[in-house]
Structures are given as structure tokens and as C-alpha cells.
Image (tube, rainbow, N blue to C red):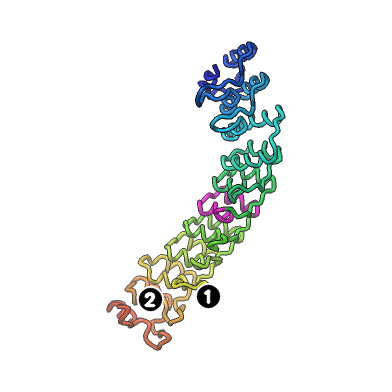
Amino acid sequence: DHRDLHSFPTRRSSDLKSPIFAILAVLLEAKADPNQAGSEEPCAAPVLLAARLGHTNVLRQLLEARGNLQAAGGSGTAVNAAVAGNNADVLRLVHEELALDLTPAAASSLLLEASARNSPAIVDVLLEAKASISTVHNGVTAVGRAVEHNSLEALKRLVEARADVNETGNHGPALLSLVRRSQLSTVRFLLDARARVDEAAPDSGETAVMAAVECNNAVLLKQLLRTRADPNRGSPVKGSPALHATKNNHLGALKVLLEAAADVAQEATSEHATADSCAPIFFAAQMDDERALSMLLQARCGANLMQEDGHTPVSIAAQGDHTSNLRLLLEARGDPNLRLRSGASSVASPAKGSTIGNQARLLDA
């Protein structure tokens, strides 16, 4: 009864002392039908069951007795079972020793699944069977599948076979997709494989640097900058990396950017300007947490940088009643006497509601 085989799923095919092999040999010598299946799963055809469990010697016995290798169950044929179970020995037995016609088209289809399952040995067999690394299914190649599932070992095999690490899948460039999910080891591998570090998503314009800033991952950001990523290349919507880090109070990312001499006076480009298109220090001046402002000032970001209407970080801090920020700006030689383009005082606007305390500090300055 082949159901006995299913009751020993942990018994390896190399264990020839198992009574299963002797019993099976007796049954097959007695002309037992090697293709007779049970009435329902998991009692599938014996060949399929042996492939699922990775019992290569059992599978060999069944096939020598004319077991049907194409017998299918709920999860497909023996080949499908070998890929799903990450069993390269079974797949190699089927492909090489039994000379099954595993066509390049079939191998290419299975390669996508093996890449997602991080099955490097299976990938090896399929590549030997002339699987195409450029096969696309639903807009994704084998590299894309490996990246989506962070299948590092499978990805290594694909790159060794000269797969393109810069291809753009459903989630953008491979490197960008991995940075978004903070997959450090795989990111390092792609960088070593010469992935284009400043490749941007075609829809949003986001780069790997911006993605690292988004998740405030200082370690990943350092890794990208070491491979000469541009610390100033942002996106049309979010502005520069330093601006995005400041707005979200991502201090770890901001520190790394400042150490890389990011341009902290950079604004969003005019053709993509938004209401938030200004240098980081203007956002830092109106935040309750003074640490970002302190970091920017230490990086010599100008305390007297001026917006188009004439507002400066000093005026923004004063009108927002951010006392500690105002003190930092004045200590950094921020000028409280600069005027708006209209000629009005930039720090004494009643509409902005600056407090008496802050007005006193400005007068003292």
C-alpha cells in the first residue's frame, strides 16, 4: 500500500535499509500496478508521492517498473512536485538519468517558481535544461521573482548565468525594491553585481537613496552612498533626500546624508515645485524637536537662507513660537532684522501670532 510511504515523510531516499524499499520491491516483482492511486489526496499516484517526499530510490524503483512520470495530482506532475519541494535530486533524476524531455519552455516556467522559493540547486538543474533567464510572466522575470521573495541564493545563481540585475519589475528596479524592504544582504549582493545605484522608479522617480531615507535605514543608506549613490537625487514629489529626512524627522538618515555632504540648501526643482518646495532648514525651524535644526546648522546650513517671500528660518521659528529653535538660529548668527519682499518685518507679523517672549528675544538679539 503506497500510503505506507506517505507515513514516513522524514525517511530519506538514501536509507536503503528501510523496510519500505524491500516491501516495494516484492510488490513490484509481483506485478503490482505502480500507477494505481488512492481515491483522494494525499493518496496520489505512487510516482507523484515519491517525488513529493524526495524519495529518489523509491521513485527509481517505480519508474523502472514503468511508473507513469506524467501522472498528475493536485499539485501537478513529479517535476512540479520536485520544484515545489525544493528537491534537486528528484528533478535531476527525472531530467538526466531518465532522460525526460524537460523542454526549455517548461524549464523556463519552472525557473520562475524555483527563483521565488530560493531553491538554488533547482535553479542549477533548470539552467542546465536551457531555461531562459529572461522569460517573463505577468511582467516579472526570474530575477524579479527572486527579488520579490528576497531569494538571495537563487539570485546568485541567476546572476552567475548573466541575468540582468538592473531590470525593472512590477515593484520598480530590483535594487529599489530590496531597499524598500530593508533587505541588507541582498542589497549588498546587487551592489557588488554592479546594480545601477541611482536607477529611479519610472512612475514615482524614487531612487534607492530616497527609499532608504523613507524607512530611516542609516545602515542601508551608508551602503548606497559608499557605492557612489547621489545624496542629492530626490524625487519630484518628495524633494531632496535631506528635505524628506528633515520633514519626517528621520535623524539617522539625515545624519548620514550630512556626513556625505548632501546639499542642504537644495529645493525641489521648479518644474516639479509644490507647496513644500523649500530647503530643509525651513521645516526644521518649525518642528518641536530641535535636533534636526541643530544638525543642519552644524552642517553650516545658512541661518539666513531666504524664501521667495523673504521669510527666513528665524522668522518661521519666531512666528511659530519655537523658542529653542529660535535660540539656536540666533546663536548661529541668524539675522532678526531681515525684511519680507513686501518691506514688512519678517518677525513681527501679527497674523502669524508670534509671542511676546519671542519678540523680546528678537529685540535682545
Q: Amino acid at mark 1?
A: Ser
Residue 345, image x, y percentages? 37, 85
The image quarter containing residue 151 is top right
Query: Which disc is residue 123 wearing?
Result: none
Element on which disc 1 rests: helix
Residue extent of the magenta highlight: 170-194
Instruction: Look at mark 1 in the image and give the residue it sits on.
Output: 270
Query: Looking at the image, which is closer to me, 263 or 112?
Result: 112
Q: Is residue 43 left or right of residue 317?
A: right
Query: Looking at the image, which is closer to me, 136 or 172?
Result: 136
Q: Is residue 44 left or right of residue 341?
A: right
Q: Amino acid at mark 2?
A: Ile
Q: CA distance from mark 2 to mark 1?
A: 22 Å
Q: Quadrant of the C terminus?
A: bottom left
Q: Can the viewer see residue 136 in this picture?
A: yes
Instruction: Look at mark 2 in the image and give the residue it sits on.
Output: 316
User: Magenta-highlighted stretch: main secondary structure?
Assistant: helix
- What residue lies at 41% left-to-right and 80% top-to-bottom? 311
- What residue lies at 40% left-to-right and 75% top-to-bottom? 329
Residue located farthest toward the bottom when viewing the structure as drawn: 343
